[in-house]
Image (cartoon, rainbow, N blue to C red):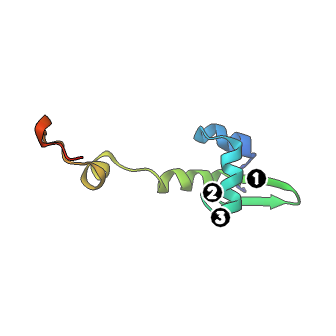
Amino acid sequence: MPDELLTLPEAGALLKLKTSTLRDWRLRGYGLDFVTCGRLVRVTSASLERYIREHTVRASEAHDSHSPSLEPVALGDRQP
């Protein structure tokens, strides 16, 4: 059975994104994989699931690679 096809508003609602953001991504070749049928644009449920999986950051990974040091800084030691 083929994947379910979602409209851009449906996919946007699941990702909590505006439809215009998904349109912009499509034009820039970023984000989700899109299916076109004439002028209609759809997103497969598999594409949506893959996007979410590939953009999920585990808490331990986020802490290790993106967190700045949380060392206290005295007010007189601040850099401009």
Say which of 47 and 28 sits in front. 28
Instruction: Tell me the element at label 2.
Output: loop
Residue 37 in the image: above or below residue 18: below
Q: Please state which of the two labelled residues, at mark 1 or mark 3, is closer to the viewer.
A: 3
**10 Å crowding of disc 2: few (<14), some (14-19), many (20+):** some
Q: Earlier in the sequence, mark 1 or mark 3?
A: 3
Amino acid type at image mark 2: Leu
Which type of secondary structure does the marked residue at label 1 adopt?
strand
Q: Give the amino acid at mark 3.
A: Gly
Question: Label 1, label 3: how many angstroms apart (C-alpha)?
Answer: 14 Å
Give the residue number, with chain letter if any, for mark 3: 29
Residue assigned mark 1: 42
Q: Toward which corner of the image does residue 36 lie, by quadrant? A: bottom right
Q: Which residue is mark 2?
A: 32
Determine whether, in the image, residue 21 is placed left or right of residue 74: right
**Residue pushed farthest bottom?**
29
x 27%, y 48%: residue: 67
